Amino acid sequence: MANKLLHEQQMELNDYASTINQVLNMFSMRKNELLALLKLAKAQDTTAVYDKEMMAQLDKKTLHNIIKVANQIEHMQACQRKDMHERFPMLSPTELDVCRLVEQGLAINDISKALGKSA
């Protein structure tokens, strides 16, 4: 029963990943760019003119769809972090994020950009 539930959860995560990749391709964006846009959309501080201009270019439906997809990405990343933490409990949160991104096949430069760290 547990294996069946685990398999179903994995299938659901795979479906989410496929959908997210299709959306990212449609918007010609990378995951970290979409997450950055989500953070911008959720930010309370909109004092930067660039931020206001970017937000003004998005209609409510587009913003809603982007937030929905980004939330799915965040959920998948949280599941991946949890799985990685269970396998490697001695690693710090940053080390777990690096491992997760390495597992996804990202290069060191992409990982450093995604995490806002130096290579």
Image (cartoon, rainbow, N blue to C red):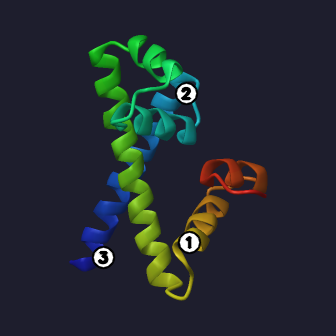
| Horizontal relation, residue 20 to residue 103: left or right | left
Q: Quadrant of the N terminus?
A: bottom left
From mark 3 to mark 1, how far is it between C-alphas? 25 Å
Looking at the image, is 18 positioned above or below residue 83? above
Rendering coords of residue 23 (x, y %): 46, 29
**Residue identified by numbered label 2:** 25
Residue 19 visible? The answer is no
| Horizontal relation, residue 27 to residue 40: left or right | right
Q: Residue at x 61, y 73 (%)?
A: 95
**Residue identified by numbered label 3:** 3
From mark 2 to mark 1, how far is it between C-alphas? 26 Å
Q: Residues within 10 Å of mark 1 (few under 14, many from 20)?
A: many
Type of amino acid at the residue the image marks with label 1: Leu
Q: Residue at x 40, y 55 (%)?
A: 76
Rendering coords of residue 5 (x, y %): 25, 69
From mark 3 to mark 2, how far is it between C-alphas? 33 Å
Rendering coords of residue 49 (x, y %): 50, 18
Q: Residue at x 40, y 61 (%)?
A: 78
